[in-house]
Amino acid sequence: MKILVVIPLAFGGGAEQVAAVLSREWAQTHTVRVLTYHLGPEQLDFGVALETLSVPARPDLWGRIANAWRRVRAVRRLTREFQPDSVMAFMDEAGMVCVLAGLLDGWLSRLIVSVHHNPQWLSPLRRLMLALFYRFPARVVAVSQGVQEELRKSLHMAPARLAHIPNPLVLRPPEESGASPADLPSRFILFVGRLDWHAKGLDVLLDAYAALPAGRPPLLLVGDGADRGKVEEQAARLGLTQEVRLLGWVRDPRPFYQRASVFVMSSRFEGWSNVLMEAMGEGCLVAGTACPYGPPEILGPDLQHMLVPVGDSAALVQAIQARLTMPEQARRDLQAALRARAHSFAAPDVAQRWIALAQQTLGDAR
């Protein structure tokens, strides 16, 4: 099968990492080409050479319109040359461009778009645009069952066009993990993700950490974002400057998962939660929020008790403290259960589900 992957950026987290993992899997047995709008400083490994437009995002309206048209033209040019059996678009900036290109050139029956966010939290204009554009692709893949239901219910998308495929987890032997930073403490509480104050519930996280008993392990935040300064200010107000460490973006956070005493996810909303899945895959104990959508599905019915209500810092304190004080045997049993659950999202299996869906759309088109 010939597959064209379209992704706005070749670096970052979330959807970009998912597209890279899936492209690497597909490239082992299929012909894959990847088109990105902008390479950026840190490029993910897609398993094939990247084709870039060198068209980074622009803030002004006319600039965005000009960019969109350049991107549509590039997708049309590449699809005419490559003649892919399936076009797979990751992120809305790629999905909407591919819808326009497919409308103009008549290959919408081969287009699959992926939705990684919770549409409930988008602006009214963005929701309206998605409701209009995403009526055209052959399939719209939701990263979680919750997102799939939200697309059906609030954006009124036809159930026959919707599908759910979870994000893939890359399984590697422990010896392949990157080197651990030399200055990691022996015990620590870990957060990994974008520093988005509201979406990631960083206010709840800091309030919960401040309420932990004396002698608590330090809190390490791996990731970066626009609200880094806000996190630093709140940590200072709470007297936590010496205990809260902001480490910035890390390419491979697995050494942190492997050595953390507990991983904390305090989000108010998610589409899935790659970092939760990754932490589980490394056997890291977790304390998180039962936010819409993703975390309850990732943990499954047997492990959902590890989640607390969204925004409830007192409950999060109890969950963190319970993991920190867990007896050794109970800790090992829970680690094994978390690993086993995470391994159900193994990348080769998830990649094959995409291929099966692409083959189904080809059959439908015929």
Image (tube, grey):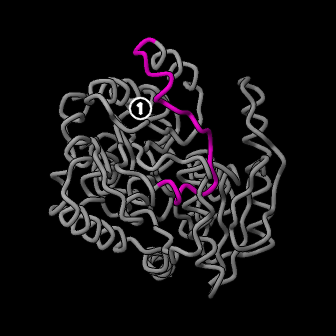
Q: Number of marks in the image?
A: 1
Image position of 90 (left or right of 312): right
Q: Quadrant of the N terminus?
A: bottom right
Depicted 343 relative to depicted 198: above or below:
below
Front-most of residues 339 and 274: 339
Image position of 291 (left or right of 259): left
- The amino acid type found where label 1 is placed reads Ala
Depicted 25 relative to depicted 69: above or below:
below
Residue 314 at x, y = what percent?
A: 19, 28
Residue 365 at x, y = what percent?
A: 50, 76
Q: Residue at x 41, y 34 (%)?
A: 200
Could you say whether the residue bearing mark 1 is in a helix, strand or loop?
loop
Q: Where is residue 166, by image quadrant?
A: bottom left
Depicted 30 relative to depicted 249: above or below:
below
Q: Magenta includes 5?
A: no
Residue 144 at x, y = what percent?
A: 34, 56
Q: Which residue is mark 1?
A: 199
Q: Residue at x 61, y 67 (%)?
A: 87
Crowding near the residue tagged with mark 1, few <14, some 14–19, many ≥20 C-alpha atoms within 10 Å: some
Q: Which residue is at the far bottom? A: 29
Q: Residue at x 58, y 52 (%)?
A: 95
- Regarding residue 283, the answer to whether it shows in the image is yes
Front-most of residues 33 and 206: 206
Front-most of residues 150 and 24: 24
Q: Which residues are magenta?
A: 237-256
Image position of 337 (left or right of 73): left
Residue 42 at x, y = what percent?
A: 75, 51
- Regarding residue 163, the answer to whether it shows in the image is no
Q: Which residue is at the far right? A: 54
Image position of 192 (left or right of 213): right
